[in-house]
Image (cartoon, rainbow, N blue to C red):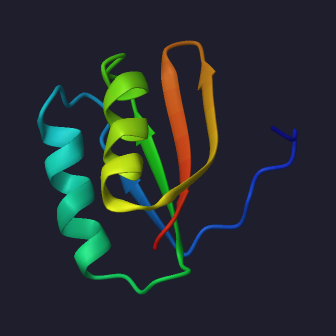
């Protein structure tokens, strides 16, 4: 992982939402995007540290970076 923040084509803010809502919103968001685009996801639910990597693995997306800072989780996902 690098310290630089990747550029994103779209940001999905799921702050304050709990499982399964962040993943459901991610499913909806990626449908509106194209392969190769980068989605930034912002979350506060600790369960996303498990759910987001599984979501990416299951659907073939690349989890570029995953960061946690004071209870806020950020994910950068390159869509397959």
Going 74% across and 59% down the picture, which residue do you hit? 6
Quadrant where the N terminus sits is top right
| Left or right position of 10 against 29 | right
Q: Position of residue 78 (x, y in %)?
A: 55, 66
Going 25% across and 28% down the picture, which residue do you hit? 16
| Left or right position of 20 against 58 | left
As displayed, is residue 14 above or below residue 11? above
Looking at the image, how many numbered discs can be counted on the residues?
0
| Left or right position of 78 against 64 | left
Going 54% across and 38% down the picture, which residue do you hit? 74
Q: Where is residue 43 in the image (x, y as percent from the top left)?
A: 39, 34
Can you tell which quarter of the image residue 53 is in? top left
Instruction: Name the residue at the right extreme.
Output: 3
As displayed, is residue 34 above or below residue 64? below
Q: Position of residue 60 (x, y in %)?
A: 41, 61
| Left or right position of 18 against 67 | left
Can you tell which quarter of the image residue 67 is in? top right
In this rendered view, identify the residue nearer to me: 51 or 16. Answer: 51
Q: Where is residue 28 in the image (x, y as percent from the top left)?
A: 18, 66
Instruction: Name the residue at the bottom extreme.
Output: 34
Going 59% across and 22% down the picture, which residue do you hit? 68
In this rendered view, identify the residue nearer to me: 59 or 9. Answer: 59
């Amino acid at each position: 992982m690098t310290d630089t923040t990747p550029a994103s084509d779209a940001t999905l803010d799921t702050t304050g939402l709990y499982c399964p809502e962040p993943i459901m919103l991610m499913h909806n968001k990626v449908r509106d995007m194209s392969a190769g685009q980068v989605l930034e996801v912002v979350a506060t639910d600790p369960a996303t540290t498990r759910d987001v990597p599984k979501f990416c693995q299951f659907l073939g997306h690349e989890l570029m970076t995953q960061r946690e800072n004071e209870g806020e989780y950020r994910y950068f996902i390159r869509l397959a």
